[in-house]
Amino acid sequence: MSLWLLNQFSTFTLAVITVGGTVVLAVAGSVLLRRRYPSLAEGEHNDMVGVTLGMFGAIYGIILAFVIVTLWTQLDSTQTIVATEATDIALITRDAAAFPPPVRARVDSALSGYVHAVVEDQWPRMRAGRPAYGATADKLEAAFDALQSYEPRTTREQVFYEEAVARLNDVAGQRRARLTMAEQELPPLLQILAFGGALVLIPLTFLYGMRRLRIQLLFVASVAALIGFSLLLVFVLDRPFAGDLSVSPTPYRQGALARYWVP
């Protein structure tokens, strides 16, 4: 469900729904409770409610901060993995320039097939949360075959051959890391803690009574907006390959790899 929402709606739309919806529900709940219990406006229990709000708010704030920082770090790491994989592929194409033309052509063909498979086949699968190792396995195997079937004849070719093989091994490792990142999501317990905590903290603000209704609604709406925005960050950062803030396949189209996309 979360992947469908991320891929179907813009971040702005999700922000309006999440933040706006949280504020509207919080304000409506506060008004209804105040009408049901008019004595809340007197602030008779404000001391106890204030202490409880402070304690819960501090604990919940630490939890949300931890979750958001963790997810942001995961997104940044995924971007680094993608950029590094694309860079290594580009370097292999440059190393292959030292090989005889037939070998170079075979390596280029294999790498071109791999790059296209990553962007056109595997990327949509990752966006949908269903990464498939087999989507690019044969293309990567073709690149290994192209290098393994070649025997360098000169010292110069040997140097570039070793570099190309080392980088192709790195590509295989980065591919696995990228697919692993595409399968990861926030553990269920942390999801319950993040979203369930909002269901506890926001209703607590209803109990903090103020004589003027506008002031109380402003207080409730402010807390709800902050929590709603924090939950929006958790929601959009949880899946690094889905939504507007997702990792882009652009590195596979740039630099030395751009020629693989020329019509």
Image (cartoon, rainbow, N blue to C red):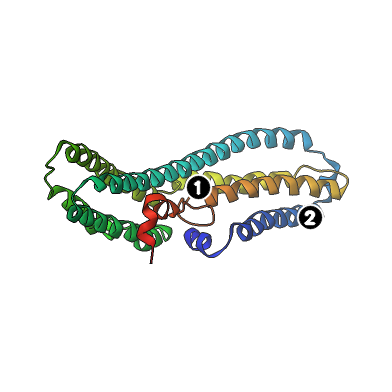
Q: Residue at x 61, y 45 (%)?
A: 230
Figure quadrant of residue 135: bottom left
N-term mark: 1 or 2? 2
Q: Quadrant of residue 24?
A: bottom right
Q: Residue at x 71, y 32 (%)?
A: 51
Q: Position of residue 46 (x, y in %)?
A: 78, 37
Residue type (three-letter) at the residue carrying disc 2: Val
Instruction: State the residue in front, 128 or 35.
Output: 128
Give the Cα distance between marks 1 and 2.
29 Å
> Local crowd at mark 1 within 10 Å, few (<14), some, or many (≥20)?
some
Q: In this rendering, would 21 be left or right of 219?
A: left
Task: Single out the mark in the foreground, 1 or 2.
Answer: 1
Q: Residues within 10 Å of mark 2 (few under 14, many from 20)?
A: some
**x, y percent for residue 195:** 56, 48
* Label number found at residue 191: 1
Q: Residue shown at 64%/48% (left/top)?
A: 229
**Which three-letter amino acid code belongs to the residue tagged 1?**
Gln
Compared to residue 250, the image places residue 165 above or below, namely above
Does the rendering let one see residue 75?
yes
The answer to which of 65 and 177 lies nearer the viewer is 177
What residue sits right under mark 2 in the picture? 31
In the foreground, 45 or 128: 128
Q: Secondary structure at mark 1?
A: helix
User: Does residue 125 appear in the picture of this structure?
Assistant: no
- Where does the image place residue 22, in percent across and percent down from the top left? 67, 54
Report how many numbered discs are placed on residues in the image: 2
Residue 34's x, y, as percent? 80, 52
- Name above or below for residue 188 compared with residue 6: above
